[in-house]
Amino acid sequence: MTQASRTSQETAQLPIAGRTAIVAGNGSLPVAVAASLREQGSNPLIVTIKGEADPELYAGDHAEISIVELGGLMKILKSENITNVVLAGGIKHRPEFRAALKPGNGNLVALYRFMRAFRLGDDGLLRAVVATIESYGFRVLGAHEIVPDLLAPAPGTITRKKPTQEGIENIQAARKAAVLIGSLDIGQAAIAIGRRVVALEGVEGTDAMLQRVADLRQAKRINRKGGVLVKCAKPQQEVRADLPAIGVSTVENAVKAGLSGIAVETGRTLILGYGETIAAANATGLFIQTFEQEES
């Protein structure tokens, strides 16, 4: 049974007390969070990261900072009477530390903490950023707490097409690899073809990994058809930031890479543009499967 729509219980939202700020990087997630808050009757402050955030986010109540001005974020949040902070969207480039030391980049204590955090791996960085924001009295929320219907639903197939036995075995192989690299704070995704892992996600991201597999197929380094992309949260994942996500572009790139399906972890993976993503998978004959978190 396919599951292209959600029940009222799955999409129920609890009211968020106090005003919320969205620290917005790139991608569609900050747009979805802002839209959900407005639908709930809130007026979020969008703190856009310069050079990263979608232009659409500048239409509402917003402030802009560069990635090296994160020390000034606390000042903005306090001046706008913010209670909650959501970190949403990606960051393409890490900052130059010398630029961060220029006068006028905000609270020096916060700036120092952020600079130290940027020397960590992705998960360590996010944990340090969350801890720094919370140390100033703000509550950090995950995007999924505001838009719960973005989370991958209960385990099962959510498209018309279902995985074959080989597809299931590809899921198992790629899942083990994704969990392993996640435990090392390297990435959140892996691809298996013919029951063999052929690609692991690094700092380049999922789309670049899919392009790499497409190039390997073009070069006939991978001859076998099919294969599965698996995405799951890192075992130590800070779930309030950087949950793994898929969307329409993931489906399109998976098709270009010659894959037959995508599998994601239920409750800890975001499906952006849920209906559109399922429709795109159905239109291209791709399956999307969800699975339970692996027990440690």
Image: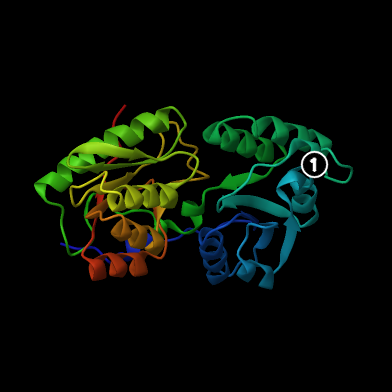
In this rendering, the count of numbered labels is 1
Say how the picture is coloured: rainbow
**What residue occupies the far front of the structure in this picture?**
219
**What residue occupies the far left of the structure in this picture?**
165
Viewed as shown, does residue 19 lie left or right of 293?
Answer: right
Identify the residue position indicated by label 1 in the image. 99
From the viewer's perspective, is residue 11 above or below residue 102? below
Residue found at x 76% / y 57%: 80
Residue found at x 30% / y 49%: 219
Residue 79 x %, y %: 80, 54
Residue 280 x %, y %: 31, 68
Residue 31 x %, y %: 55, 65
Q: What kind of residue is marked 1?
A: Ala
From the viewer's perspective, is residue 200 above or below residue 266? above
**What residue occupies the far right of the structure in this picture?**
103
Residue 33 or residue 15, whichever sits in front? 33
Residue 244 x %, y %: 42, 47
Crowd class of label 1 (few under 14; some 14 to 19; many from 20; radius 10 Å): few
Q: Which quadrant does the N terminus fall into?
A: bottom left
Q: Which quadrant does the C terminus fall into?
A: top left
Element on which disc 1 rests? helix
Residue found at x 46% / y 59%: 147
